[in-house]
Amino acid sequence: MAPGLRDRIVLIDKATFPRDKICAGAIGARADRLLETIGVHIPVPSVATAGFQVSARCGTLTTRLPGRPIARVVRRIDYDAALLDQVREQGVEVRDGVALETLERRATGVELSTTKGALSARAVVGADGVGSTVRRSIGLPRGRYHAQAVEVDTPWAQTDRDRDLLCFDIVDDGLVGYAWDFPTRVDGASRVCRGVYRLTRGAPEPHLGAPRAEAARVDIAERLAQRLRASGIDPTGLHFRRYAERGLAWHEPCAVSRVVLVGEAAGIDPVLGEGIAQAIFYGKTAAEYLATCAERGDYRFGDYRAAVMRSPVGRDLRIRAAMVRFIYGPRRPLAERWVVGSHHLAVAGISYFSGRRVPRKRLWGAAVDLAAAAWPPWR
């Protein structure tokens, strides 16, 4: 926790914990490492993973890193409740089962109306997700990038060969997105979380010349059902879970006087929809920023967006937003060749995801591999 904020925080959440949350649950090890720097460890049941597997029309690339796991897959009902317990232990007042109804900014503070009465605050942090009441209350637009996802937990199939990998499938024609298969645990049993992600707002022109109207008609639940059948799994009777996500575009505002946004309320990765690690890094950035503002007694927050963009999470999100057109636009075939053809890119990406130093030679190698993918010898 940032200095100066310990005795000034009240956390309200409309849910009562423990509560489940729809999420594939893959947490890059960089998030756990960041929490460890402030003495926080979340020891919940999880599945450790050692690498990625990415499949495309032009092939499959499997990459593992030796040493510590690159990520773990958790169930949010366990993880979020354990994290909230850690927050309580730090002396933060937690009021769950309290929903925000209205928010009014004034010169001297913020007045909040909740389902359990009124609250007054010097400043408010909106960390209330894609449907953020705080964001709507301060008049910010819904944002450029929105996505939909659908997921389901299944037993392992005969086609599942590696149980220690995060598997991504970018083969689907006409889908501005990808499919995933992550190892997980459900009520103590080994399972696979399978899902499909689609960028629905802010998507570039469809790849492969597919008409935009055709791409918009893609039914991600049916795509997921097709993938299950291809793996020998009958989707009948399975519980498909749908949810929405908001991606961050670098030029969009994420604060007004007295109010800042973090996590998906502000926006996360629009390419893959990764959110847990980014939300934790948002928290570090916002805590340090708010501690400085509190010391100065200045709650205008005019430079909050700039502070976010200078931070590790801001640099990460700017790169990912810049990659949307490359990954999902007319050059997607090139992107696919690069992603499944560059071991250098894979090692660099996994190293970053797991919080390890990214070898410079891997970045140079990835650039060379991109050039090779753009101008293959048979052209």
Image (tube, grey):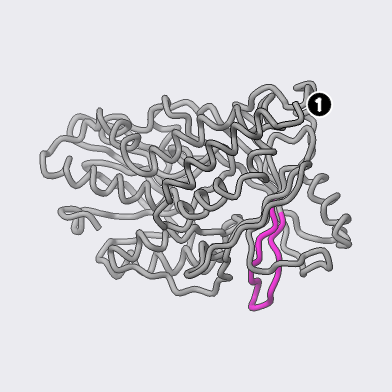
Across and down, in percent, residue 2 comes to: 22, 54
Residue pictured at 70% horizontal, 57% vertical: 181
Q: Can residue 19 be seen in this view?
A: no
Q: Does the magenta stretch include residue 188?
A: yes
Across and down, in percent, residue 88 comes to: 32, 67
Examine the image and state in which quarter residue 234 appears: bottom right
Residue where numbered disc 1 is placed: 214
Height in image: 351 above or below 135?
below
Does 292 sit left or right of 43 as displayed?
left
| Nearer-the-camera pick, 109 or 301 | 301
Residue pictured at 48% horizontal, 62% vertical: 16
Height in image: 24 above or below 88?
above
| Nearer-the-camera pick, 44 or 255 | 44
Does 62 sit left or right of 274 as displayed?
right
Does 195 sit left or right of 96 as displayed?
right
The magenta stretch is 180-194
Looking at this view, name the residue that lies furthest to the front.
Answer: 377
Looking at this view, name the residue that lies furthest to the left.
Answer: 296
Mark 1 Cα shell of 10 Å, populated few (<14), some (14-19), many (≥20): few
Check disc 1 and report its element: helix, strand or loop: helix
| Nearer-the-camera pick, 288 or 367 | 367
Across and down, in percent, residue 58 comes to: 77, 42
Q: Is residue 319 magenta?
A: no
